Structures are given as C-alpha cells and as structure tokens.
C-alpha cells in the first residue's frame, strides 16, 4: 500500500504509542459532525485533487491530517478530559492518530477524482498512483 519511505516512517510511529488513546480519539474525530464539515471534508478534497494530479505524497497527507488531530484533541479535551489532556500526548501518538484517520478516509480520497470504471477496481491508493504515473503523457 505504501512506498518504503512511508512504511519506515509508519513503523517508527508504532513505538510506545498508547493504542487505547489513539482508538478513542480516532472514534471521536470520525464521529464529530462539526470536525467533519470544517476540517475533514476540505482535507479529503485537497488530497483528492493531489491524487487527480498525481502529486499525492503519503507523508504530506499525514501532516495534512495533523491539523484535524490537533483540533479534535482540543475539542475532546473541552468536552471529556479536562485541562492538561492535550499536553500529555506526545508527537508520535498524534501522528499515529493522523495515520489512522488517513487509513480510514483513504477510500474517499481515492474515489473522489477517479473515473467510474476505476472506482470498482481493488487498487490501493499507492497502486493507483503508480498506474496513473505510468499512463501519464509528457
């Protein structure tokens, strides 16, 4: 699914990450309608455009979701956790949350700009991009 650089980056994220906190925040962020409308939809649209132009970069996509993660953590802290929750989360945990969100929305990102015949294919986003680059005319 990912190229070797992204895989090594993701493997470094999995060290010492609180899986329960990651799962809780991913569920909170994906189920909050305000965050979806104001943050998630623009990110999906932007990344879909990148896929359409064949300029998609997996590492930059994770960084795009970091803004959503930071806003989601702030909102979660106000509603459920109380002050100091956000300060207790390290960068690896936040990046792991961003990766989970990217994985969750990958299908929407890939489908937004594809032709109808390609929607039914079982290509991952990485395979789709390789195919698109290969067929690109210069």
Image (tube, rainbow, N blue to C red):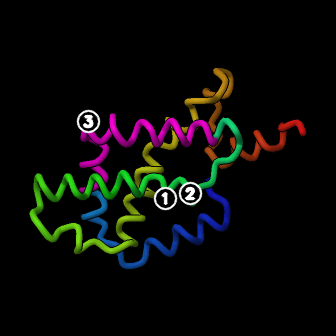
Magenta part of the chain: 24-50
Residue annotated with mark 1: 63
Q: Residue furthest top?
A: 116
Residue contact between numbered discs 1 and 2, judged by CB atoms under 8 Å: yes
Q: CA distance from mark 3 to mark 1?
A: 21 Å
Q: Secondary structure at mark 1?
A: helix
Q: Is residue 24 above or below residue 93?
A: above
How dense is the environment of label 3, judged by Cα within 10 Å: few (below 14), some, or many (20 and up)? Answer: few
Q: Residue 76 shows which numbered tag?
A: none
Q: CA distance from mark 3 to mark 2?
A: 24 Å
Q: Is residue 31 magenta?
A: yes
Q: Secondary structure at mark 2?
A: helix
- Return the x and y of residue 108 as percentages of the image width and height: 49, 35
Q: Is residue 76 above or below residue 89?
A: above
Q: Is residue 68 above or below residue 11?
A: above
Residue contact between numbered discs 3 and 1, judged by CB atoms under 8 Å: no
Residue annotated with mark 3: 33
Residue under the point 26% across and 37% down: 34
**Magenta stretch secondary structure, dominant:** helix
Q: Nearer the viewer, residue 81 or 10?
A: 81
Mark with earlier residue (3, 1): 3
Q: Quadrant of the C terminus?
A: top right
- Return the x and y of residue 47 as percentages of the image width and height: 55, 42
- Return the x and y of residue 28 as percentages of the image width and height: 24, 49
Q: Quadrant of residue 57?
A: bottom right
Residue annotated with mark 2: 60
- Return the x and y of residue 16 as percentages of the image width and height: 36, 78
Q: Secondary structure at mark 3?
A: helix
Residue contact between numbered discs 3 and 2, judged by CB atoms under 8 Å: no
Residue under the point 25% across and 64% down: 21
């Amino acid at each position: 699914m990912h190229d070797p650089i992204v895989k090594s980056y993701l493997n470094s994220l999995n060290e010492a990450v609180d899986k329960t906190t990651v799962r809780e925040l991913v569920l909170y962020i994906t189920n909050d309608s305000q965050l979806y409308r104001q943050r998630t939809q623009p990110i999906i649209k932007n990344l879909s455009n990148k896929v359409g132009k064949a300029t998609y970069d997996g590492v930059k996509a994770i960084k795009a979701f970091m803004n959503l993660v930071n806003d989601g953590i702030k909102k979660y802290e106000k509603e459920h956790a109380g002050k100091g929750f956000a300060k207790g989360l390290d960068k690896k945990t936040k990046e792991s949350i961003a990766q989970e969100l990217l994985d969750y929305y990958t299908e929407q990102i890939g489908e937004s700009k594809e032709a109808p015949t390609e929607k039914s294919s079982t290509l991952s986003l990485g395979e789709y991009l390789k195919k698109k680059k290969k067929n690109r005319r210069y």
